[in-house]
Image: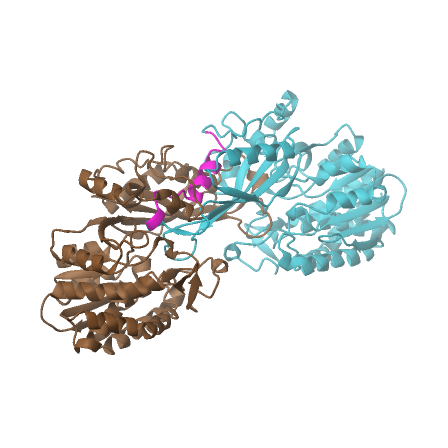
Chain colours: A brown, B cyan
């Protein structure tokens, strides 16, 4: 009888829970852009006072970058840590938003209610599902069910530069029996999922320079090598005609999928046609001999996230530019080593620079892929608790995104991480018009109450 | 004895001529950017009143774009038309300028004097060399030497959209015995040149769209085709490994250089190593089996003048963008037809778009290459007059740039055009820190006085 009153309380308190989330969404905590530094502090302050309002000893902890928020409540049973991030992605292109990204609202969309605004899904909405579950528990039982540590960062969307040092400096304080991470999604519309496989990430941001000034293509065109021509050749040749990545040794540490995992994934009946069709695409673009779920969950990738050079303004300018730049990122799997891939990428690029060309890197840090240890019995307890809340039984799935912290908990603290989230493929995270379904928020809160009960039963 | 007093007057009046040029250079008449529309009107007004001050019946003639300036003086002998343009290129990247591009000044550079500022060489400084020659002639002789028409446009740097309609509507008024165009340069430091061969220009400005929104590369990376990957492949494959352009039929209408012209060009002893070395480049990038002068004067080219897509701001964003864009231009030679090349380019691009991708063009108009008829005796008169002013004899040369009006005079008015200018390779036209040598300005004015005397003798 510990659970039902908590679930009822959650249902009754939903309007107030939404008001609290909208307050947090109004803070433009874009971590990658220095212009929003103050807003990241404001978001951290908001979380500290909200945690304190439910009896958590919470405080803002400064770092060389944006602050961490850490809070503790004592209790018996297992020590559970919950991680989320309060920073969000940039909002450009702003003209594609139907409303101010930081003036969130509940909207009707195809007959269902959605919470619209930057961060509504990634990750403020998801983060608050756990906080609201704890609030309801506290209000019903007067205490939380066990010893819980809250750990929120503000640099997840910008490579988490302060995270590893902070975890190392505070290892004793952050070590727990399980780390819950809410930054993932459902599988499809109604199948709860626990992510057991995460891709790593390596980013390279660089500029190549040819002529030492912009040139007139009338005077120099034909004889002077154009840096954009050099850059497009380098980037185009990163993939071969089969969609495979051409860097020497790139696939050396990429394991084949175990047959049982492949079988389980096949049983999910992933509809890649509608997955792509929903965003206006027709055919899969990855390695031709791989299934769509392998492409997004267990195969490494290379994408150009940004490219610029020459004249990009109104009208036409026949310039032969001095420089061309790109931001390239790799999704890593298995045992791929970010440093080894970075070295391979740089020697590939430099081997293709014409004599006299130079290159400057603005490196982004890399993180390897990670694999959860589902032999930990807490995984099955959580899986069954999720299955009680949702129409379908919960599944163990992979995730194409990079949530490096999952690996850090294991490597730095020796703590297993369990990734559970309630986002949907159409949440448009990192895109204009990001949203979070009201049902994701509501049933997400209820799911955490069930999981807390299951882990402390 | 008609010439010497004019030359002396030019020498004496040089400081005042410089003051007049600096006044014109202070007007930011950037034609490609709508923000400077009013400044283009101001520049036209300035020229009208300056021409009127030397007795020319000049007026501003509105067009759908920026205005033309047309002025006439009556007289005996041949009817000479002089063309120049008062518009200038954009100034970005502004941070690479050592001074405000529109706060011009006379500076010392390696022991010589230069006029620094946007338009100082291209084309305001060159345009004023002819006006100042006429001013001196008028002041010495009370009249100009013959019937002269002044014809200045304000859209040369943005494709001259109004030029052809205006020339057709005013053909009778603009028809003359010879059209003098001052928008070219010396060969090297001290060899005056008459351009007899000009490359044409075709521009394409386009955007390709894949997914209908920006995607998260973690969720879609590997399965969703990235428009930047598509664009870089399309652009990279425009050149083969020998530097040749791969568009089907691209070279069909490209003539081989006549042996005598090749011989004359070889005799110029072009130093391509220093031509490239001066801008920080080591090796020629064009077709490997062509001489450097062929590459810039008589061979067609393809250059990407601008490229953009995805996230190009500070920090890193793992976005898989919906769109990628580029501005591509072709320099055309011989009988290459801009429309035929445009069609070939578009079918090449579209044949390489993945299923479901779309493309939008913002076309820039094209112009074919042109060839001057040097059998017109005025060419030799001008060549000898130039040879009297400069240390070296004047040469007939090619020009890699596009000055479409040269062809228009022939096609629309039946008038031969003669291209004579005094710019230098290191004038950095279209680039930051554009300059015009004081000696180019001074001897340019004197050169026009000599040519006027020779053509009317």
Q: Is residue B199 above or below residue A196?
A: above
Instruction: Pick out the residue farthest to the left.
Output: A76
Which quarter of the figure has residue B420? top right
Question: Percent x, y for residue A18?
Answer: 34, 71
Residue B48 falls left or right of residue B188: right
In-front residue for pair B199/B63: B63
Judged left or right of residue B360, residue B1 is: right
Look at the picture and state if B269 lies above or below B426: above
Residue placed at 77% from the left, 27% from the top?
B375
- Residue drawn at (85%, 42%), measured in percent from left and top? B172
Residue B259, how many percent across, how many down? Answer: 63, 21
Which percent across, then down, holds residue B27? 67, 59
Q: Residue at x 43, y 44 (%)?
A: A281
Residue B227 lies within the magenta run: yes
Q: Is residue A234 left or right of residue B198?
A: left
> Percent position (x, y) of residue A309?
48, 47
Q: Please report the residue visible at 85 percent of the width from the left and 44 percent of the height from the top.
A: B173
- Residue A327 visible within the image: yes
Front position in the image: B354 or A193: A193
Q: Which of the two residues, A182 or A155, is positioned nearer the viewer here? A: A182
- In this image, A276 relative to A309: left or right? left
Q: In the rendered image, which quarter is residue B174 located in?
A: top right
Number of marks drawn:
0
Q: The N terminus of chain B appears in which quarter of the rendering? A: top right
State whether residue B3 appears in this view: no
For the C terminus of chain B, the image quarter is: top right
Start and end of the magenta stretch? B219-240
Q: Is residue B6 above or below residue A93?
A: above
Check residue B386 for magenta coloring.
Answer: no
């Amino acid at each position: 009888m510990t659970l039902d009153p908590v679930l009822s309380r959650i249902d009754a308190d939903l309007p107030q829970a939404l008001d609290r989330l909208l307050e947090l969404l109004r803070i433009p905590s874009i971590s990658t852009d220095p212009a929003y530094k103050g807003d990241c502090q404001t978001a951290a302050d908001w979380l500290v006072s909200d945690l304190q309002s439910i009896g958590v000893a919470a405080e803002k902890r400064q770092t060389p970058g944006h602050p961490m928020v850490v809070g503790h409540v004592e209790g018996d049973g297992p020590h559970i840590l919950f991680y989320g991030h309060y920073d969000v992605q940039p909002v450009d292109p702003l003209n594609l938003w139907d409303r101010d990204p930081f003036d969130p609202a509940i909207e009707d969309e195809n007959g269902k209610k959605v919470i619209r605004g930057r961060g509504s899904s990634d990750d403020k909405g998801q983060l608050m599902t756990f906080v609201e579950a704890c609030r309801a528990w506290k209000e019903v039982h007067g205490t939380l069910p066990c010893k819980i540590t809250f750990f929120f960062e503000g640099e997840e969307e910008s490579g988490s530069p302060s995270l590893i040092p902070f975890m190392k400096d505070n290892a004793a304080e952050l070590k727990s029996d399980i780390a819950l991470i809410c930054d993932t999604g459902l599988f499809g519309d109604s199948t709860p999922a626990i992510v057991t496989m995460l891709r790593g990430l390596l980013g390279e941001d660089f500029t190549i320079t040819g002529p030492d000034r912009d040139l007139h293509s009338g005077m120099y065109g034909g004889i002077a090598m154009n840096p954009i021509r050099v850059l497009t050749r380098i980037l185009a040749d990163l993939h071969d005609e089969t969609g495979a990545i051409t860097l020497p040794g790139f696939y050396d540490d990429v394991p084949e999928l175990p047959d049982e995992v492949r079988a389980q994934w096949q049983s999910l009946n992933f509809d890649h046609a509608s997955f792509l069709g929903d965003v206006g695409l027709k055919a899969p673009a990855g390695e031709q001999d791989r299934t769509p779920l392998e492409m997004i969950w267990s195969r490494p990738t290379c994408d150009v996230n940004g490219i610029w050079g020459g004249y990009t303004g109104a009208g036409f300018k026949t310039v032969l530019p001095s420089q061309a730049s790109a931001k390239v990122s790799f999704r890593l799997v298995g045992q791929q080593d970010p440093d080894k891939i970075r070295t391979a990428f740089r020697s590939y690029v430099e081997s293709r620079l014409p004599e006299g060309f130079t290159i400057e890197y603005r490196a982004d840090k890399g993180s390897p892929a990670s694999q959860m240890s589902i032999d930990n019995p807490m995984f099955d307890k959580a899986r069954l608790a999720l299955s009680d809340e949702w129409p379908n039984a919960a599944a163990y799935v992979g995730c194409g995104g990079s949530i490096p912290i999952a690996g850090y908990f294991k490597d730095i603290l020796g703590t297993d991480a369990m990734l559970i989230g309630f986002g949907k493929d159409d949440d448009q995270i990192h895109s204009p018009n990001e949203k979070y379904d009201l049902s994701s928020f509501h049933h997400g809160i209820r799911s955490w109450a069930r999981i807390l009960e299951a882990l402390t039963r």
